Image (cartoon, rainbow, N blue to C red):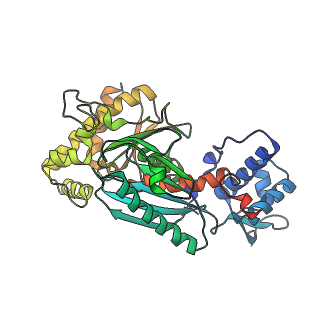
Amino acid sequence: MTAPLHEARRATSDARLPDTQQGMRRRNLSRVMHTVAAHGPLSRAAVASRIGLTRAAVSTLVDELIRSGLLDELGPERPGRVGRPGSALAVSARGPVGIGAEVGVDHLAVCAVDLRGETRARIVRPARNRGRSPVPVLEELAVLVERVSDEVRRSGLPPAGLAVAVPGLVARNTHTVVRAPNLGWHDVDLGPLLRTALPLTVDNEANFGALAELWLEGESPEDFLHVSAEIGIGAALVVDGRLLRGTHGFAGELGHVPVRPEGPACPCGGRGCLEQYAGEEAVLRAAGLDPGEDRVALLAERAAAGDKEVRKALRGAGTALGIALTGAVNLLDPRAVVLGGALSRLAPWLLPALEGELTQRTAGRSCKVTVSGLGPDGPLLGAAHSVARAVLDDPVGAGGAERAG
């Protein structure tokens, strides 16, 4: 089991269930699932002790979850416990899986994650998506989604849903990409184009990256600003373990915060935006390098070898990042700033200038800057885990406990 995914402090369900007998049952099913996921294998008695229900009530819930294929009985608990050993329970490795997909400027990716947090299938394909019509891009993505779905189905793992990460603004509670400047997309509804029968969620890639950081990185605080970059730069704010989305779902557009108002034009329509100084292509231009198959690896290799132009370009990017982050840190007072995506691989050369700007411009306010261990995989993993966690949060509503009929 991927333990950090199921830490107890994350175990509170986000589901808004009605305050009825049926709603209470669904909440209790969720509590059992989260408890076993976080601390299992556990006996029924141990689950009852942890969530404060009677052993009889927990046994009824557990039996329902076992019939649904969401929990497994592994046999007697390990020796050494006092009293008669109970049967150990664990989250099933044969239960539903979450399908996550990512539309990048230069790639498409799909993966499947089971309820234990383990990746069961994965495909990543290079793709030049900038300026392409959404139709062929999403047709290609749909083919990859179907391939991954077929692979897990052959293993007896039913997909529970599909979540898609995109590098753009997504209208809250919709499937519509309102604007993705680095793709050239405007007002694109992914639902009809993907033509999937699975329950669909679409969200900004930085949001999914932040959720992956929250769920998968054991040391992450519950209040942090997550910054990620590839071609563009995105950010997401997590407060008290929850994602802050904003009124329209557009919170976190750090890449289009102006750091030099008189600077170059940006695809978003503004001038001097952070992306024009700290995005991948901006750093490559400043370093005198041409775009290649793996831009970030090239920058990291040259910087590690002592290339003065590359290091200068990365210092400039770090400075721009520090300026842009100053406003966010002063306004929001996060406990930490986490660098993810491509930035994580370039952190040794970005951090000194970034931290210097923050220290100077925030009056020495304490805000730790850390580097994500997930790297560029964060958005894809966050998307897939969001679907898997939806099953834990609401085993009935997400197609869990009622499948047994």
Residue 282 visible in the snapshot = yes
Vertical position of residue 290 compared to residue 251: above or below: below
Residue in front for this viewpoint, 186 or 386: 186
Residue at 18% x, 34% y is 264
Q: Which of the 4 image quadrants contains residue 337?
A: top left
Quadrant housing the N terminus: bottom right
Q: Quadrant of residue 85?
A: bottom right
Q: Position of residue 288 (x, y in %)?
A: 12, 49
Residue found farthest to the right? 56
Residue at left offset 45%, top offset 29%: 333
Horizontal arrangement in the rendering, residue 239 relative to residue 292 (left or right):
right
Work out whether residue 93 or residue 359 is closer to the camera in this orientation and state it: 93
The residue shown at (77%, 62%) is 405
Using the rendered image of the protein, determine whether residue 6 is visible from the camera's viewpoint.
no
Tally the marks: 0
Q: Is residue 4 above or below residue 86?
A: above
Name the spot of residue 208 as percent of width and height, x first: 47, 48
Apparent side of residue 297 relative to residue 95 in the rendered image (left or right): left
Instruction: Tell me where residue 124 appears, x and y as whole percent.
Output: 38, 64
Q: Nearer the viewer, residue 249 or 329?
A: 249
- Where residue 128 appears, as percent x and y from the top left, is 28, 57
- Identity of the residue drawn at 13% across and 48% down: 309
